Image (cartoon, rainbow, N blue to C red):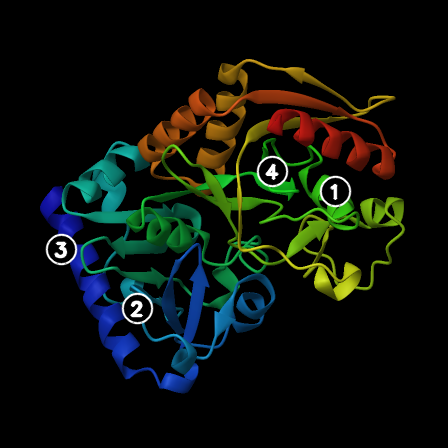
């Protein structure tokens, strides 16, 4: 089983490297985040508009020292060459990932579309194999290349988590919650009141005693009702979740910040009459953070669980019961962060 799977991924990686080397330099993009990044090229210009909207991307000549490279192929090369789901001889996806990890490869396989994301940790090279442009997942346009961003960050001893970040006056908080918990609305409302943020959905965190949140996606997402509640117009096209996706500077003249410290972990909860904070069990925060991250990324569960466990054991955890008044929320949040600092 392992030999057949290893043969497949080696052939896939070799194919990707050959195609990447053939790609014109004008069709390569430098994507940087969290003090690392990768060069990206694709067989057709499918993701370029999303990358320019959501990621920090430059022309290659502006950054030729990035440590990794990724190539996306949409030609169904793997199907046309007879590579049909070699994972089928494994009992499940987790077993397949363990086998891949044993020879230094991280991967995600989406069975319905027979789409592969494969990354060689030793060579710092990855390839996406996809059967046509119409087989892209619906979330890809607003969170492009998430698997590869995670794997490249891991090489720099950082971890990608499903969380938002907010900070002011040198203090920072990681906002933790499943989709619909109020992370994006809180981030956007705080940005309008002078706070900073390194992201509203995915965040790269530094592992170690001095935790920091690093920006990955430079865009934010919010539904029309949430924008209206903040007094903002919704002129953008909506994504698959019915949310507008935009860079904050285009609407409220505020940029996503490259990084900020993590001094506290906060679980937001909508619906209170007045914004209050209460201490909450690290175990409760761990379950929300680890499970939502594992669900979003779909692989590397051991690394995710370890990073999330270390984080909640180190950083104090609180629940934030939020009112619907943005001004009141931001005032109380600023006051709370000042108290944590003292």
In the picture of the structure, the residue carrying the numbered disc 4 is: 171
Q: Is residue 17 left or right of residue 303?
A: left
Q: Is residue 321 above or below residue 51?
A: above
Mark 2, residue position: 77
Can you say whether 97 is above or below 46 in the image? above
Task: Please indicate whether residue 64 sits to the left or right of residue 271 in the image.
Answer: left
Coordinates of residue 104 in the picture (x, y in percent): 18, 48
Residue occupying the point 80% across, 24% down: 275
Q: Mark 3 falls on what kind of element? A: helix
Between residues 301 and 84, which one lies in front from this camera angle? Answer: 301
The mark closer to the camera, 2 or 4, is: 4
- The earlier-in-sequence mark between 1 and 3 is 3
Separation of residues labelled 1 and 2 (CA atoms):
42 Å
**What is the number of the mark on residue 185?**
1
The quarter of the picture where the C terminus appears is top right
Q: CA distance from mark 1 to mark 4?
A: 20 Å
The x and y percentages for residue 126 are 30, 60
Mark nearer the N terminus (2 vs 4): 2
- Looking at the rendered image, the disc whose residue lies closer to the viewer, 1 or 3, is 1
- Taking the spot 44% from the left edge, 24% from the top edge, the residue there is 314
Q: Name the element at disc 2.
A: helix
Whether residue 314 appears in this view of the structure is yes
**Residue behind mark 3:** 7
* Gap between marks 4 and 3 measured at Cα: 49 Å
């Amino acid at each position: 089983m392992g030999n057949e799977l290893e043969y497949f991924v080696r052939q896939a990686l070799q194919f990707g490297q050959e195609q990447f080397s053939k790609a014109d330099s004008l069709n390569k993009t430098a994507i940087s985040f969290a003090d690392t990044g990768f060069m990206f090229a694709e067989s057709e210009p499918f993701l370029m508009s999303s990358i320019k909207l959501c990621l920090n991307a430059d022309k290659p000549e502006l950054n030729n020292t990035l440590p990794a490279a990724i190539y996306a192929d949409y030609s169904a090369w793997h199907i046309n060459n007879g590579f049909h789901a070699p994972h089928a001889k494994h009992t499940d996806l987790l077993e397949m990932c363990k086998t891949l990890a044993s020879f230094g490869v991280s991967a995600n396989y989406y069975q319905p579309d027979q789409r592969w994301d494969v990354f060689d940790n030793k060579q710092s090279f990855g390839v996406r194999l996809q059967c046509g442009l119409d087989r892209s997942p619906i979330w890809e346009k607003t969170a492009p290349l998430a698997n590869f961003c995670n794997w490249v960050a891991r090489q720099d001893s950082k971890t990608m988590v499903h969380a938002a970040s907010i900070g002011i006056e040198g203090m920072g908080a990681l906002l933790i919650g499943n989709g619909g918990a109020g992370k994006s609305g809180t981030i956007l409302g705080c940005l309008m009141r002078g706070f900073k943020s390194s992201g509203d959905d995915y965040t790269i965190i530094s592992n170690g005693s001095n935790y920091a949140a690093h920006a990955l996606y430079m865009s934010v997402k919010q539904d029309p009702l949430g924008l209206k509640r903040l007094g903002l117009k919704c002129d953008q096209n909506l994504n698959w979740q019915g949310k507008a996706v935009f860079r904050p500077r285009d609407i409220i003249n505020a940029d996503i910040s490259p990084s900020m410290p993590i001094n506290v972990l906060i679980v937001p909860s909508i619906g209170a009459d007045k914004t209050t904070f209460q201490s909450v069990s690290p175990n409760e925060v761990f379950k929300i953070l680890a499970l939502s991250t594992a669900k979003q990324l779909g692989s590397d569960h051991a690394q995710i669980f370890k990073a999330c466990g270390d984080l909640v054991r180190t950083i104090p955890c609180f629940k934030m019961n939020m009112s619907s008044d943005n001004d009141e929320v931001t005032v109380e949040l600023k006051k709370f962060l000042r108290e944590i600092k003292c």
